[in-house]
Structure formats: C-alpha cells, structure tokens
Amino acid sequence: MGIRKRGKRTWFVDVYDGKGRRIRRSVGTSKAVAELTEKDLHLKIARGQYLGIFDTNGTPFSEYAKEWLERKKMNVSQSTWRDYKSTLEVHAIPHFGGIPLNQIRRRDIEELLDKLGALSGKRKNNVMVPVKNIFNDAMRREDLRDNPCQLIRRFKEEKPQIDPFSFPEMKAFLDAVEPHYVAYFTTAFLSGMRPNEMLALKWLHVDFDMRCISIREGRVQGIEGPPKTVSSSRDVDMLEPLRQVLLQHRAVSPQDATYVFRNQHGNPLGVDNLRNKVWYPALKKAGLRMRTMYQTRHTFASLMLSHGEDPLWIARMLGHTTLQMIFQHYGKFIRNRARKDGLRFTQGLAEAGLVPSVPKLPEGPTVYTNPEETAKPLSARPEEHSEISMELKDGHTLGTNRQNCHKKGATVSRNPLI
C-alpha cells in the first residue's frame, strides 16, 4: 500500500481505513501531490472523518477479482478454485475489465449474461457463482453500497437425464468391456459410487472383513481431496457379488498397489481416457445407446428402488442426507409405483366391506429398463428376466443372483451378474 505509479504517468494513492476498507485514488502525474494526498488520507483516517469511499472510482473489477481469488485460495478446494479462476478469466474479466467495481450496474451484469448466448442454464448459473461472490464479498467489506447482482435472475436448469441400465444391458456391457476394467465397472454398478470417488479409491479404504468401502477422497481435474459435502464421506456396503469381484481383483493387483483401480500401465485412472477409450467403445461394441458414465450410479439407485429396497438405505449408500434427492430423481422407479398409489388402502376398504371389491395387488417387483419404458411385471418379460439371469429371493437381489446361477448350473463368466 502507499503511493505507486501506474503506466508511464499516473500516480495512485492506495491505503486502508480503520475498518479495513481499501481506498484508491488517482492523483495525476505528480509524485509530490500523491505523497501529500497520502498524508492527508492518513490524517483523516486518524480523525475518523468520512472519506467518501463510495464517491471514488474504486478498484477496477479485474484487480478486485484477482485479489478475491487470492483470498479464496485457502477456503475452497483446488478444483473449485480452478473453476472460479477459469470462469473469471474467460467470461467476467474480459467483459468488465477495468470498470471500477462500484460503477458496475445491474444492466452490466445482464449484458454479461446475454453474451453467454446459447450456454445451458446450468452453465450460466455457474458463471455467475464467482461473480456474485465477488460482489457479496465487496458488500461485506463495505467496499460497495449497492450489490448489482442482488436481483439478477437465476436460470432454469434442466433435470439430469436418468437413463439407467437394465440387468440384460449390464450383462451386455460387462461382457463387452475390456477385461482389465470389468472390476471397475462392476463396482460402479453395484455400489452407486461417483466416478471421482472411484478414481481416488485406495485399498486401505476397502474392508473385506467388515464388507464395506469407505469413501474419504475424490479426484477432480487430477487433484485429490476430501469429498465436497460432509454426507459424501460415507461407508458403502459391499454386496456379496461385489466382494467376490474385488477379492479377485485384489489377488491379481500388485501387493504394494495404492489405488484400487489403475490403467493397464499401472498408473492412476484418468476420467477422460476412461470415458473415451473404454466406456464409449464398450457401449458401441455391446450395441447399447450412448450414455454418460454417471448412469452407473443412476442404475444402482433405480434398480434397487424397483426391487423394493429401503430408500433410506439407498440414500445412505449414495451419500444423501435426506430422501429428497431419491424421490426427486428416482421417484418413478420406486416399487409401489408399479401400481396406482392408494390401491393397498382401497383394498383395505374392500376387505372391511366399505367399498366393492378391487383387484389384488400385482405380485413381484417391477423393473424399469429406461425412463421411457412403461413399467411391466417381471412375468410379462421372460426374455429379459429368465430364471438364469435373475431369480428373486429374500434380501438383496444383486447379492444372491450369483449364487442362484451356480445352483442352476449356468455358465459362469467374468461377468458377476450372470
């Protein structure tokens, strides 16, 4: 702080008042005037006089944004900080540039949003996150009197597409994918873990005796760190078929290996290579429609719900603290939705003689193979749910399926689901 020259001619005075507010003033081309102005400001600060902070030009947005990024470095994860930095450098700083922070108005913010053009609503909202944070920070530090972002609209975001695999599709995919990656994708289908959690999974967090996988880290943009939310740090139950797959995977992995899943060269997996060189080619080879890798997580949730598993248990497995996300995204897969809601209550009325008799409830769970398909009882779909491919028993269907295959003498492949 103090006086400094900017460019070839202009001198600036830069001081902080008693409340930690920054005061910057341009005083022209004379260094002597700048020194006198600095002394005058310090004198007024000592006397507690009003310095007209909001009447000055203020700090240029570009400089304030860079200072804000430095302060944020210690408060957010490295991946989040990188996102903020990239967003500001690509969108906000080129738009606002040297405009003083306290001269930016709501119309300037709206012009920035208009320039984003055809970007999705979610992306536009993400661009506004660091911009809003900068102005909120300036308000807290009393660098601004009005917040131009206060009434800026939030764009409507499209719901994520839920396009889960059916059991036959899971079988087809696991048969088509490169053998080296079968363990990875089997774990993805049978645990509901996020891709970034699986990339960072270490053997020390896999407990075969307790039959659980501890989620303690994630890897985003090559950087590992704790999960983004407290609830994401969790223990995932290891279903029996998954336990068998991971035991076999451990046996063929180097004893000194740190990561559970590595590429064919023994290095940590990269999500881009995994997606483009393994996931998409396997989908194409299996004759399946293109999906994102995140659909493995959606598959776990939807199939568990459609087979009558406890939504609370599923929410805990996925790292959700409430059932809101379960019902919001996977409500149509809940087993009771195979019939009209209220049918069991109506049946009770009929048994009490209060209303005419009603049809009995359908027996057996309903499996939804994709969002567009109408729910059908298993008995109506023998080609997809034969006795060999899936036999329903008490408890977790996925956990008993492999045993049922052995009992019926089915050929056992590297696919743990058949």
Image (cartoon, rainbow, N blue to C red):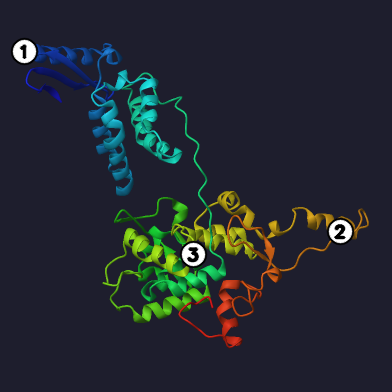
Quadrant of the image containing the C terminus: bottom right
> Which mark sits nearer the N-terminus, 3 or 1?
1
Q: What element carries label 1?
A: helix
Residue type at numbered disc 1: Ala
- The residue that appears at 29% across and 48% down in the rendered structure is 78
Task: Estimate the spatial distance between the alpha carbons at disc 3 and disc 1, rounded to whole Å.
Answer: 75 Å
Residue type at numbered disc 3: Leu
Disc on res. 88: none
Q: Which residue lies furthest to the bottom in this view?
A: 409
**Picture quarter containing residue 267?**
bottom left
Q: Are marks 2 and 1 in contact (CB under 8 Å)?
A: no
Q: What element carries label 2?
A: loop
Residue 200 visible to an observer of this rendering: no
> Which mark sits nearer the N-terminus, 2 or 1?
1
Label 3 Cα crowd, 10 Å radius (few <14 / some 14-19 / many 20+) = some
Q: Is mark 3 on a helix, strand or loop?
A: loop
Q: Position of residue 89 (x, y in %)?
A: 26, 36
Disc on res. 358: 2
Q: Write down the residue under mark 3.
A: 288
Q: Write down the residue under mark 1.
A: 32
The answer to whether 117 appears left or right of 381 in the picture is left
Circle nearer the viewer, 3 or 2: 3
Label 1 Cα crowd, 10 Å radius (few <14 / some 14-19 / many 20+) = few
Q: Which of 338 and 187 is in front in this view?
A: 338
**Relative vertical location of residue 55 with respect to residue 205 in this rendering, above or below:** above
Q: Where is residue 3 in the image (x, y as percent from the top left)?
A: 11, 21
